[in-house]
Image (spheres, helix red, strand yellow):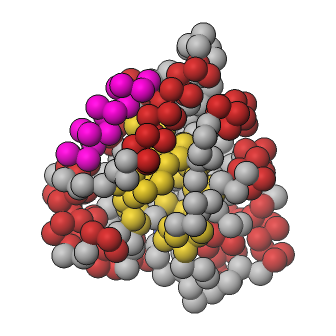
């Protein structure tokens, strides 16, 4: 399996990221990040709203691994959209992480029509701040998260730089093909948050049957399936055993007919977090 995805600005991003959503701040997050780095992950995904950036930063530092060897992503929270606020929120994230640059910074959720009349302008202004931070060399690359087709299209029209990634919910039964295709057309890497459906896919009978055939866990099957669909998985775990398990996916390959069975699985909405209707 490939070790990196190539981004549209030529940078490489390690092909499995370590997710930290719902990883409690403090020793849990510090230990999880250290365990992940020791296990071989070189890509850590956090966000201001996860409230664990300080611990994630400590975990990176305490791992002893060189800063340049780790790809670190954080995300701008919704209340901080707009040019000036984005600049300040970025400084705070960087300070909390105790880093002097980020590899990637994402707009966490799009401003949406039913909450803001001028939502397109808000997204454009926020994006302009990210472009400026990128120009200053403080972020290596920039992207978006949870942007659906009708959010991404207007952003692409106003943007100077095309987002490098779009991080969306993606797991068996929830493939969001429209936005995945639009991303592919624009050379935007799709990242999968909750590749295990926040753990809810682990009891799925179809997946259990296929996983048995390859003698792997359902989690490993889901993560490998995401990658074989050319999407970048971000599995989260706080358990040392599962953190290690989730990166061991090179010893098997899902056959085309099994890929198809999983791709055709019935709709499973997973988290239910729809960017247009969720109200944070
Ligand atoms: P835990 O942190 O206790 O390991 P997702 O990445 O889709 O959001 O899923 C995360 C959820 O799945 C968490 O509840 C996590 O719990 C659980 N999880 C992560 N990896 C595994 C695994 N290999 N086996 C079982 N559960 C897992």
- When asked about the image quadrant of residue 228, the answer is bottom right
The residue located at (18%, 66%) in the rendering is 61
- What is the x, y in percent for residue 272? 59, 35
The residue located at (43%, 40%) in the rendering is 132
Q: Establish if 179 lies above or below 30.
A: above
Which residue occupies the foreground of this view, 150 or 30? 150
Q: Is residue 83 visible?
A: yes
Which residue occupies the foreground of this view, 113 or 123? 123
Q: Is 94 one of the magenta-colored residues?
A: yes
Furthest toward the front, the residue is 136
How many numbered marks does the figure carry?
0
Quarter of the figure that contains the C terminus: top left
- What is the x, y in percent for residue 171? 63, 55
Furthest toward the bottom, the residue is 251
- What is the x, y in percent for residue 241? 35, 75
Q: Establish if 83 lies above or below 202.
A: above
- When asked about the image quadrant of residue 274, the answer is top right
Residue 116 appears left or right of 60? right
- Magenta residues, as a range? 82-95
Q: Is 55 one of the magenta-colored residues?
A: no
Which residue occupies the foreground of this view, 205 or 134? 134
- What is the x, y in percent for residue 5? 59, 69
Q: Is residue 204 visible?
A: no
């Amino acid at each position: 399996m490939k070790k990196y995805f190539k981004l549209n600005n030529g940078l490489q991003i390690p092909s499995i990221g370590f997710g930290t959503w719902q990883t409690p701040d403090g020793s849990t997050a510090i230990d999880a990040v250290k365990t992940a780095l020791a296990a071989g992950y070189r890509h850590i995904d956090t966000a201001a709203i996860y409230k664990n950036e300080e611990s994630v930063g400590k975990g990176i530092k305490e791992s002893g691994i060189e800063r340049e060897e780790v790809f670190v992503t954080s995300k701008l929270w919704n209340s901080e959209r707009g040019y000036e606020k984005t600049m300040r929120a970025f400084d705070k994230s960087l300070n909390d992480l105790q880093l002097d640059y980020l590899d990637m910074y994402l707009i966490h959720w799009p401003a949406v029509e039913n909450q803001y009349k001028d939502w397109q302008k808000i997204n454009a202004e926020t994006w302009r701040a990210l472009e400026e931070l990128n120009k200053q060399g403080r972020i290596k690359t920039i992207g978006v998260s949870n942007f659906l087709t009708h959010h991404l299209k207007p952003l692409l029209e106003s943007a100077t730089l095309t987002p490098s990634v779009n991080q969306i919910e993606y797991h068996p039964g929830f493939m969001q093909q429209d936005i995945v295709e639009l991303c592919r057309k624009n050379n935007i890497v799709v990242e999968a948050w909750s590749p295990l459906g926040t753990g809810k896919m682990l009891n799925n009978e179809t997946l259990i049957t296929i996983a048995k055939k390859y003698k792997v866990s359902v989690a490993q099957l889901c993560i490998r399936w995401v990658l074989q669909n050319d999407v970048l998985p971000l599995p989260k775990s706080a358990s040392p055993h599962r953190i290690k398990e989730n990166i061991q996916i090179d010893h098997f390959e899902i056959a085309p007919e099994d890929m198809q069975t999983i791709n055709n699985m019935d709709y499973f909405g997973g988290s239910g977090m729809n960017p247009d209707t969720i109200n944070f």
